[in-house]
Amino acid sequence: MDTKSTVFVAGHRGLVGSALVRMLKNKGYENILLKSRDELDLLDQAAVNYFFQQNKIDYVIIAAAKVGGILYNSRCQADFLYENLVIAATLINAAANNGVRKLLYLGSSCIYPKLAEQPLKEEYLLTGPLEPTNEGYAIAKIAGLKLCEKYNMQYGKCFISAMPTNLYGPGDNFHPENSHVIPGMMRRFHFATLRNDPEVVVWGTGSPRREFLHVDDLAEGLHVLMQRYHDPQVINIGSGEDIPIKDLAYLMKDITGYKGEIVFDTTKPDGTPRKVMDVSKIKALDWKPDYSLEEGLRSTYEWVLENKIFENDDEKDYRRLRRGEIRL
Ligand code: GDP
């Protein structure tokens, strides 16, 4: 892949897609192809085929996905399974039939069995039952990565899959209920600080451990994979280090300047007890993250403040959710 190649980033408006576009532009890529949801419905195979026929696409990175935190994921499993399955199927099939030279598909660390040995090695895939709160999402992602592997085996296509750990950074979804832990917590600590609330609620027991990676570090890693990784076997990408949710909460307290107490809402699910990746494969390709978790969280919070992410947000969605006027 070089700066003249035509690269289609599917899902460029999301957390990962927007970081990929930033990274490619910084490196001088001139032909980045982007389509919004209104312009191209990734659930429509005929429309996707037509798009690939009309554009000579050299490289595809699939960052498009329906994603969400533990509550959203567990409550809307049919949507997560259906949409992610179809997005993978349409794009991978169209790429295979239209001369794409290389495709990178993104999965997630939740594809590994709930109680797999830690750190999670790539070969633990399909060795045990999945975490029930994200089974629909995980099954779709497993189907997508297997599709890449099978196109590789049957047709010799260079379609590869990377499994990122929990991601965060600029462009994340900061919704009060359907976001992941970092943006969800950042939002609650932010408002609690402004309102001088005596306590902030953190979901679950605080004991689950999670690994986090800044999305700009991910984008650099994916560039390395586009250049140097050709194996059909999935490859993990993460920091290789995890922390308990409780410690993350205290870090967030410090970063947002919150002065009150932290309380744990144990009626909310914990999810899988631990999810930390073995990242020796990608480290062998000479990649490692630049951001420490603390630096990454501080710079993400600065981005949130600079971009006034919460400024026009009077939490009306949240109130409507509480009143039952809208459903997730
Ligand atoms: P997961 O890795 O699929 O479980 O995704 P999440 O990022 O949604 O949740 C990670 C862990 O953080 C879970 O144990 C949650 O219960 C916990 N958690 C604590 N506070 C929050 C919050 O405000 N939002 C979310 N999404 N999770 C939280």
Image: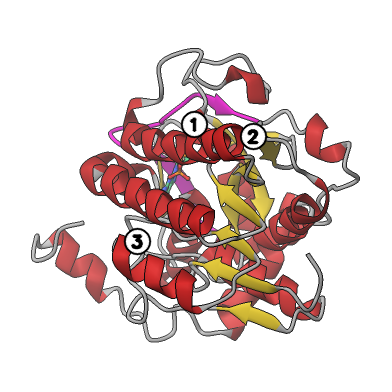
Position of 162 relative to 205 (above/below):
below
The disc, 1 or 3, on the residue closer to the chain's N-terminal end is: 1
Q: Which residue is mark 2?
A: 234
- State the quadrant of the N terminus: bottom right
- What's the distance in space between the residues labelled 3 and 2, CA to CA? 32 Å
Which label lies toward us, 1 or 3?
Answer: 1
Label located before the other in sequence (3 or 2) = 3
Residue 176 numbered tag: 3
The image quadrant where one finds ligand 1 is top left
* Closer mark to the observer between disc 3 and disc 2: 2
Left or right, 123 with respect to 88, comes to right
Q: Is residue 223 visible?
A: yes
Image location (x, y in percent) of residue 156? 64, 40
The answer to whether one can see residue 68 in this image is no
* 275 part of magenta stretch: yes
Residue at position x 57%, y 40% from top? 155
- Which residue does the numbered mark 1 point to in the structure image? 111
Question: Real-space Cα distance between discs 1 and 2?
Answer: 11 Å
Magenta span of residues: 258-276
Residue 239 horizontal side relative to residue 65, left or right? right
Q: Disc 2 marks which amino acid?
A: Val
Residue 323 as seen in the image, left or right of residue 63 = left
